[in-house]
Image: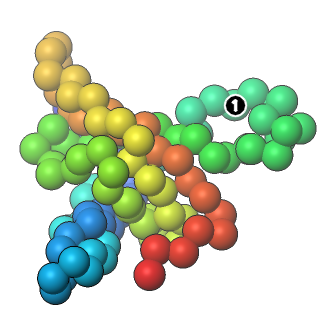
């Protein structure tokens, strides 16, 4: 059984790339189907003002996602990819991503 039936968001992946000389810019590398949820549901995060900052995501194992990439979900939330862990054993083979969301961060 795979996790494909759980993937419910089309997320745009962006990667830092050289555009001219020493100039770098984030460019879109593709759209990936994934499932994103908060890493923890602890109510204390709201007290300290960091509720919803750290997330976990799952997607197909063959997707090209690296640490340092950025992604944007259909709701306009923007995330930094902090870690990529390939779960390549068992029945549900997939990529597991650790994401950080910043509410006011601009990627342009």
Camera-side residue: 104 or 2? 104
Quadrant for residue 106, please give it.
bottom right
Query: Could you tell me how many numbered marks the image carries?
Result: 1
- In the image, is residue 31 above or below residue 88? below
Q: Farthest residue to the bottom: give it.
A: 20
Tell me the SS state at disc 1.
Answer: loop
Badge 1 crowding class, 10 Å Cα cut-off, few under 14, some 14 to 19, many 20 or more, is few
The residue that disc 1 covers is 41
Q: Position of residue 82 (x, y in %)?
A: 41, 41
Quadrant for residue 26, please give it.
bottom left
Question: Quadrant location of the C terminus?
Answer: bottom left
Residue name at image x 65 percent, y 64 percent = 103
Q: Is residue 102 left or right of residue 12?
A: right
Q: Position of residue 46 (x, y in %)?
A: 83, 41
Q: Position of residue 65 (x, y in %)?
A: 22, 50
Q: Position of residue 81 (x, y in %)?
A: 39, 48
Q: Farthest residue to the left: give it.
A: 62
Residue name at image x 24 percent, y 47 percent = 66
Q: Farthest residue to the right: give it.
A: 47
Camera-side residue: 78 or 38? 78
Instruction: Using the rendered image of the protein, determine whether residue 60 is visible from the camera's viewpoint.
Output: yes
Residue name at image x 75 percent, y 27 percent = 42
């Amino acid at each position: 059984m795979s996790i494909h039936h759980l993937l419910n968001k089309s997320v745009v992946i962006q990667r830092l790339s050289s555009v001219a000389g020493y100039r770098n810019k984030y460019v879109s590398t593709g759209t990936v189907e994934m499932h994103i949820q908060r890493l923890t549901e602890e109510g204390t995060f709201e007290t300290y003002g960091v509720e919803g900052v750290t997330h976990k995501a799952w997607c197909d194992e063959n997707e090209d996602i690296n640490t340092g990439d950025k992604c944007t979900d259909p709701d306009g939330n923007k995330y930094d990819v902090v870690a990529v862990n390939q779960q390549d054993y068992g029945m549900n083979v997939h990529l597991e991503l650790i994401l950080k969301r910043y509410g006011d961060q601009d990627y342009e």
